[in-house]
Image: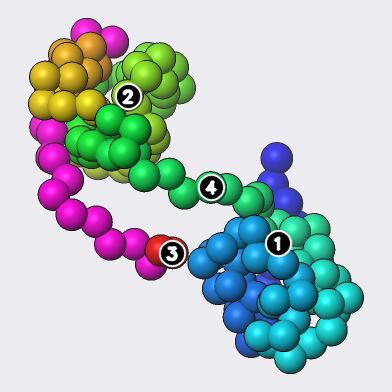
Amino acid sequence: MEGPSVTTSEIDEIDERLLTLLREDGRRTYSDMASTVGLSVAAVKRRVDRMREIGVITGFTVQVDYARLGWGIEAFTELRYTGRTRVSEIVASASKVPAVQAIYGIAGDPDALIYLRARDVAHLRETIDTLRNAGPVTGTKTLMVVGTWTRDQ
């Protein structure tokens, strides 16, 4: 289900600053944000509520250090499937593998890009073997992550 379409004119510089503050800390208080951007607490709450209503803010999450939980290996695995395998079949089979964190159906070759986390190299190997046997897979290529930078962090 899609939300209402948003134009860039609906999001002003103050909204952008509020989004940046919330990306830094989703638990930041309205009071803290109000003092930072120079608005009243009520005005900040109205702006955040509006951005939630129009679908710009889709939720609040926690960032987890998976390495501290014993899941220190990150990798991307390209999957290639036989001829007419449907995207829904790819998602259905790969999503059953606990180490799989995200499944990207992509145009071109390969058919899907899988983001996964593993405890160690042996677990990564087991996960890749499981993915290879989870459907009509004709080939894989795995890239292990050695460092990460993202815009939102």
Q: Which residues are magenta?
A: 132-151
At label 1, counting other C-alpha atoms closer than 10 Å, the crowd grade (few under 14, some 14-19, many 20 or more) is: few
Residue bearing the label numbered 1: 5
Q: Which mark is residue 62?
A: 4
Q: Position of residue 114 (x, y in %)?
A: 29, 33
The foreground one among 146 and 33 is 33
* Location of residue 1 (image quadrant): top right
Residue bearing the label numbered 3: 152
Label 2 SS: loop
State yes or no: residue 135 in magenta: yes
Q: Is residue 118 left or right of residue 99?
A: left
**Between discs 1 and 4, the one toward the N terminus:** 1
Please tell me which residue is depicted at 23% across the width and 12% down the height of the picture.
130
Label 3 SS: loop
- Mark 2 to mark 1 CA distance (whole Å): 34 Å
Residue type pointed to by label 1: Ser
